[in-house]
Amino acid sequence: MLNRAFDVYAFPIDKPEDSRIANLFHDITDIKRHKDHVELLLKEVNHCAKNMLSLVNVIARRTASSGIYGFLERFSDRISALAANQDILVKSEWKTVDLNDLVRGQLAHFSDLFENRIHVDGSPIMIFPEAAEKLGMALHELTTNAGKYGALSNTSGQVQISWRRERTEDRHSYVMEWRETGGPSVKAPQRTGFGSLVSGSLLTSGLGGSVDAKYEPSGLIWRLTCPLASVTVVDDTASVRAEPLTRKSEEVGVLIVDDDALLTRSISEMLEEAGLAMIGPTGNVEDALALIAHARPSFAILDVKRGTETSEPVALELQKQGVPFLCVSGYSKDQLPDIFDEVLFLPKPVDERRILKMIQQQAELKTLEH
């Protein structure tokens, strides 16, 4: 009878001279579990929807920053790429995603070229949903550029997409390569646009590792190298640690702990423009704790849930050191762990100007206290 739920109804036995009562027990365990499961799913849907709106907000602003001409087409294409990712994630029930399905989904517009001009080569690998989101956006940008300017813009160019696992003495790595041949002559872009960010620094900040893009006479060669543990489950792996950043003692150092690389980049740029120094950012709890130990921040911004872990250990360490921090989340505040009850809170999608204002207010309070 343990861990069961019952609906209990007590009533008198229908005789005036009888003082006894009867009890009716109705086992409602399955009903309650179903109700709790539905409530949990609704909370997760709300959380995912807010995160998606936050991402759409950043994509819109980033796309518009390169000029209003062609904005609708570029923005629509990027939203379509997000939708393709969502289809694959929902199909996998937000568990692991088949990388081959992800690649073919993002190149669906060129599906008639597979095995003829587009070649996919890689051993089967199931990747984390968070990695699938980032890789999906990068693949979309690479595909778009190949269709407009590269190997897929003519009738003879070829694209080879491959991935593999590599192991050294102290590390398991994941390597993915996009190689174009037979297209028009290409050259490196003169400015870093949204597409370069998504397939470059935003991807590496989300997964760790590095991206190398070479514009050879024969075509673009793009290569991602990152810890295997960033994309899939692996045993006995040595993850890449974030490099601690130093700062001048008089600067306000802001730590950001969030695995949404696009949002993190947008917030970081805004804070740096305001003259604030950044610590990190990172999407990993262990890296965040290492950064705090190396350079105590003046303020921190935490997303509560990142992948399969939460930022509670980071929040505990910040509270221990007396560092104020802001919680941003797709969850409502009453759904957060108790440690976040008394902290500053902003729901996603985030108004980045409010973040800057909160940091400035905290800095003013600290000045008054001294």
Image: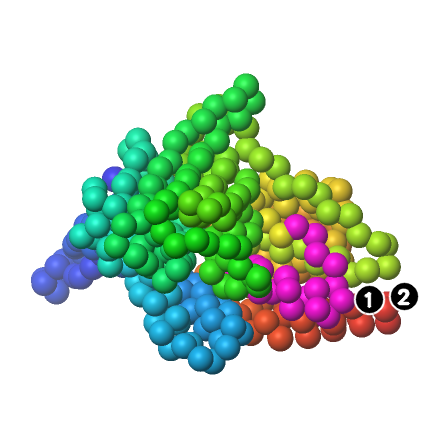
Secondary structure category for the residue under label 2 = loop
User: What residue occupies the far right of the structure in this picture?
Assistant: 370
Q: Is residue 126 left or right of residue 369?
A: left
Q: Which residue is mark 2?
A: 370
Q: Which residue is mark 1?
A: 366
- State how far apart marks 2 and 1 are (Cα): 7 Å
Q: Is residue 40 left or right of residue 32?
A: right
Secondary structure category for the residue under label 1 = helix
| 356, above or below 288, in the image | below
Q: Dividing the picture into quarters, in which one does residue 83 lie? A: bottom left
| 251, above or below 352, in the image | above
Q: Is residue 268 magenta?
A: yes
Which mark identifies residue 142? none
Q: Camera-side residue: 181 or 227?
A: 181
Q: Which residues are magenta?
A: 262-280
User: What residue occupies the far top of the structure in this picture?
Assistant: 169
- Three-letter amino acid code at disc 2? His
Q: Camera-side residue: 13 or 122?
A: 122
Image quadrant where one finds the C terminus:
bottom right
Q: What residue do we see at 46% from left, 47% from top? A: 217
**Disc 2 to disc 1: CB gap under 8 Å:** yes
| Residue 66 visible in the current orientation | yes
Residue 175: percent from left, percent from top:
44, 35
Q: What residue do we see at 68% from left, 74% from top? A: 357
Q: Is residue 215 magenta?
A: no
| Residue 305 visible in the current orientation | no
